[in-house]
Amino acid sequence: MASIFSKIVNGEIPCHKIAENDHFLAFLDITPLAEGHVLVIPKQEIDYIFNLEDDLYSGLFLFAKNVSKALEKAIPCKKVGMAVIGLEVPHAHIHLIPLQHVGDINFERPKLAATQQGLAATAAKIIACFN
């Protein structure tokens, strides 16, 4: 069965898309830890990030790096943090989270109550910051 992320890639489930190319997709997390919490995925459904072929693995991180630069411009933060957990969805993914404090990347914290309008506005701010 296709993961929820594969359904997003296939257009079966909508998302607030930040960036996309032939191999990767970045979109806002609908249950963010902080404003601008972005998920970066390979379009190919592979469960475990360390099972990605080397070119796909390095491409994913380079794509995430590009997204993080736009994210850092759009959302005031000290740094953009990165986490790879991989337990919540069986599809390799990277979390990019704007950080003010180390606790901002604690996944046991309550999530923000994001609205569709708020997510759309955040996505537009990030997209506007790509060079």
Image: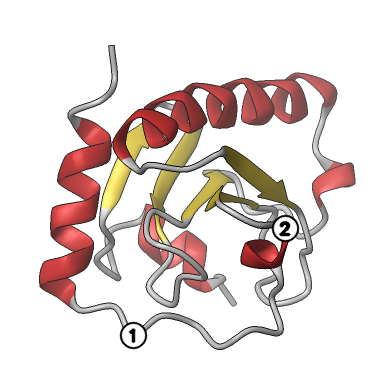
User: How far across and down, in percent of the image, does residue 108 sit?
Assistant: 71, 84
The CA span between labels 2 and 1 is 20 Å
Residue 102: mark = 2
User: How far across and down, in percent of the image, does residue 112 sit?
Assistant: 41, 80
Give the camera-side residue of 20 and 7.
Answer: 20
Q: For mark 1, what is the residue?
A: 113
Q: Quadrant of residue 103?
A: bottom right
Look at 74% across and 22% down and name the residue there. 58
| Other residues around mark 1 within 10 Å, as few (<14) / some (14–19) / many (≥20) | few
**Which residue type does callout 2 highlight?**
Val
Question: SS class of the residue under badge 1?
Answer: loop
Q: Residue 84, relative to residue 114: is it above or below?
A: above
Name, please, the residue furthest toward the right.
Answer: 50
**Which residue type does callout 1 highlight?**
Ala
Sooner in the amino-acid sequence: mark 2 or mark 1: 2
Name, please, the residue furthest toward the top.
Answer: 131
For residue 92, side relative to residue 131 (left or right): right
